[in-house]
Each structure stands twice: as C-alpha cells, then as structure tokens.
Amino acid sequence: MRIFAFFVIAFFTTTVACASNITCGCATLQPSVTVTVKDAVTHDLVPNPTFSLGAATVNGQCIGIIPDDAGEAGTPNCEQWRVTLPVGHSTLVVSAAGYQPQTFTFDTTLTNDCCQTGTQLTQTAELTH
C-alpha cells in the first residue's frame, strides 16, 4: 500500500508541476470602459471626444459607427468608445471641443486565472456647452 501511495503522490506532483507550465491560449482582457458620448441637451452623439487618465491623454477605440448619422463633412459618428483602464482606482476625463469636460472614477480588477479578465464597464457621458 505504501508503494501505491508513493506513486499516487509522485504522479499528482508531476501533473501539477506540468500543468503550471501550460500556456493558456487566450489573451488577457485588460480592464476597460465603453463610453457613449452625447450632447446633454440634444442627446446627439458628440464627435471626436478626447479622453485622459490622470494627466495623460489616452486613445479611445471607436467600437460602433453609425454611417447614417453623418457628422461634420459627412463622416460617420462613432457610437461608442472603448478606453483601457489601469487595474485599481482611476479617474477618466471625457471632453470635446465646445463642451465642458466630465469626470468619472472607476475601480477595476484583473482576475488571477489563466485567461485574465479585467473589469468591463459602460458609461454615458452627457457633455454640456
């Protein structure tokens, strides 16, 4: 029986050690917020918003284009913007030309499993003139 127990323990230890070296096969999904930027009065989409985290300007990724809602010069407006956030506490400022900036605070996490997933948030910014 002792020999059997030794082999079971040795097999389990080897299996766990090997499993920890296996790659996940999936990308980490960083924390982010999906922002819809609208005019507070008309509720129309605001073209070309800018985003900053702390003192740094960050890029927003356009993730929804409405071609039939043409903006300036007949170009389509972006419906939503995705901004990658750091893990932890952050302050996002959303602004656009001719509008007052709006500030949001977020607290985000990142899971510790094989395919790490960050907090995914949504926010509507209603900017005023």
Image (tube, rainbow, N blue to C red):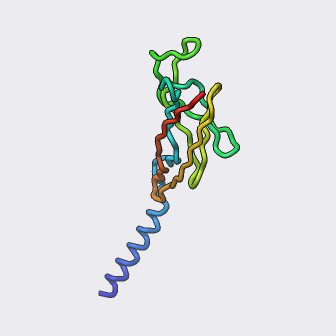
Q: Position of residue 8 (x, y in %)?
A: 35, 77
Q: In which quarter of the image is residue 10?
A: bottom left
Placement of 103 over or under 95, stated as above or below: below
Residue 41 lies left or right of residue 55; in this view the side is left
Placement of 15 over or under 31, stated as above or below: below
Q: Where is residue 76 in the image (x, y as percent from the top left)?
A: 52, 18
Quadrant occupied by the C terminus: top right
Q: Position of residue 51 (x, y in %)?
A: 62, 36
Number of numbered discs overlaid on the protein picture: 0
Pick the residue in front: 101 or 15: 101
Instruction: Check the image and name the residue furthest to the right.
Output: 55
Q: Where is residue 82 in the image (x, y as percent from the top left)?
A: 52, 37
Placement of 118 over or under 93, stated as above or below: below
Instruction: Check the image and name the residue furthest to the top.
Output: 73
Residue that appears at 47% across and 63% down: 20
Residue that appears at 34% across and 85% down: 3
